[in-house]
């Protein structure tokens, strides 16, 4: 146990460096992902790339899924057994940043697909590594981890708002309603959206430097009895609670990635201006900040099953509202705020549960294993399925029937909520703050 960890355990204080890590981690992701479907699908005549729904699904979901499948070896095994976590993060982010910057200059589907796979192999493992590093330096992860994740949500919002407001509009002026600064849309907005990919690449390189020199040292567990850390982590599925969570997480992650494959296109199709798409979608992260701040007390008072059931049910509710396209634009935009309950109550609670049930020497690998489900298996299904459902919901005029599409997603969310509510049982025993690290 490091001296820093002892200080944290004694004072229940969160190291400010962990907040900085979460800010950079999610700013890198949040500056480009919410609008990716918009610039990937827009016609070349307005600066987009003109990719189909199937191609977009492959780039956004399947590429990430392949990266997640490499994560148990790249992140779990290496970080848990051989190299310090902060050094692994630095190397992965440096290479990933260079790849991301190069991707922005490509115009063909093949180039975007292959470079997106390479980037995912570098970036996806960093998500589980930041989770495990943070939890290694928190005295009480159940209470403190939601606070660090709230900062991550703030970073996602800030990155998206600043980019959209400054780069996609002209003649800015203050307004009382979010995003607080409005102006005239630039005619080549989809082309300028691609610049978000360049920004993400540059930010990733800077983040890598911070990881190498600024993060607390988090050494591997060299003395562990089980040499294959990820094999031991995957054995957690023998617990009934983990098996139920895995099944539920697959279903929820499928519809979670439907959101990123379709939401920005959907909002544009119902009349939301390009410059407001990312700020509107960031309402979900704003609500996530609020929910993260109360997630610890929620878990203590309500328990894991109730909280995770609520998260899955909110996926159903959000997509049911999206599907009711006759609703006013304002009502559909307001439903984006449900993302906070969706993500925090289901996924963040799941990460905390896995950390509590996993043996000490495979916590990095356990986080990576659940990430394999959330960012690997689910998206691997979601990518092609997004194309299949889109084709099935396509109207005779060539426009997607979003009502039908979102109702299908809502049905999957309801099934996941029922699965967790009926079959999940909390198998963790030690509910006290963990101090052995």
Image (tube, helix red, strand yellow):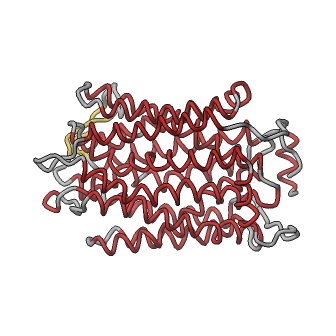
Give 272 or 154, whichever is nearer the viewer.
272
Indicate the quadrant where residue 274 lies.
Answer: top left
Residue drawn at 63 percent across, 54 percent down: 370
Residue 155 position, x and y percent, is 51, 45
Q: Is residue 210 above or below residue 339?
A: below
Spot the residue most to the left.
397
Q: Is residue 252 above or below residue 90?
A: above
Residue drawn at 35 percent across, 43 percent down: 278
Indicate the quadrant where residue 127 lies.
Answer: bottom right
Q: Is residue 248 above or below residue 201?
A: above
Residue 76 position, x and y percent, is 69, 65
Count of numbered labels shown in the rendering: 0
Residue 182 position, x and y percent, is 27, 35
As drawn, is 352 to the left or to the right of 195?
A: right
Q: Is residue 422 above or below residue 247?
A: above
For the N terminus, the image quarter is bottom right
Residue drawn at 16 percent across, 51 percent down: 187
Residue drawn at 53 percent across, 69 percent down: 121
As drawn, is 33 to the left or to the right of 314?
A: left
As drawn, is 98 to the left or to the right of 304?
A: left
């Amino acid at each position: 146990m490091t001296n820093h960890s002892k200080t944290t355990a004694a004072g229940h204080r969160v190291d400010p460096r962990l907040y900085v890590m979460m800010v950079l981690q999610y700013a890198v992701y949040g500056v480009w992902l919410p609008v990716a479907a918009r610039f990937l699908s827009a016609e070349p005549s307005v600066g987009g790339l003109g990719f189909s729904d199937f191609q977009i699904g492959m780039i956004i979901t399947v590429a990430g899924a392949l990266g997640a499948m490499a994560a148990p070896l790249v992140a779990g095994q290496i970080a848990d057994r051989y190299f310090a976590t902060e050094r692994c993060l630095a190397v992965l982010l440096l290479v990933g940043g260079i790849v991301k910057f190069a991707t922005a200059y490509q115009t063909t589907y093949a180039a975007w697909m292959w470079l997106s796979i390479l980037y995912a192999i570098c970036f996806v493992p960093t998500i589980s590594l930041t989770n495990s590093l943070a939890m290694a330096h928190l005295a009480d992860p159940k209470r403190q981890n939601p606070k660090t994740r709230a900062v991550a949500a703030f970073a996602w919002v800030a990155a998206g708002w600043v980019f959209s407001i400054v780069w996609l509009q002209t003649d800015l002026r203050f307004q009382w309603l979010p995003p607080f600064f409005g102006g005239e849309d630039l005619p080549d907005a989809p082309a300028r959206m691609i610049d978000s990919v360049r920004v993400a690449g540059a930010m990733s390189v800077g983040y890598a430097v911070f990881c190498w020199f600024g993060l607390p040292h988090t050494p591997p567990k060299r003395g562990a009895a089980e040499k294959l850390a990820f094999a031991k982590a995957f054995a957690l599925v023998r617990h009934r609670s983990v098996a139920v969570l895995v099944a539920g997480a697959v279903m929820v992650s499928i519809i979670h990635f439907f959101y990123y494959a379709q939401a920005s296109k959907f909002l544009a199709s119902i009349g939301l201006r390009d410059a407001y798409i990312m700020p509107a979608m960031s309402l979900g992260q704003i609500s996530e900040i609020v929910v993260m701040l109360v997630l610890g007390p929620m878990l203590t008072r309500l328990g894991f099953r109730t909280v995770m059931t609520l998260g899955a049910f909110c996926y159903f509710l959000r997509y049911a509202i999206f599907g009711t396209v006759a609703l006013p634009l304002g009502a559909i935009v307001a439903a984006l705020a449900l993302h906070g309950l969706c993500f925090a109550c289901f996924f963040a609670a799941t990460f905390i549960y896995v950390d509590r049930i996993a043996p000490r020497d495979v916590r990095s690998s356990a986080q990576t294993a659940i990430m394999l489900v959330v960012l690997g298996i689910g998206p691997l299904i979601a990518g092609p399925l997004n194309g299949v459902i889109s084709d099935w919901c396509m109207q005779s005029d060539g426009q997607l029937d979003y009502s039908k599409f979102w109702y299908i997603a809502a049905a999957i969310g309801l099934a996941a909520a029922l699965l967790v509510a009926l079959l999940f049982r909390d198998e963790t025993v030690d509910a006290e703050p963990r101090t052995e690290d």
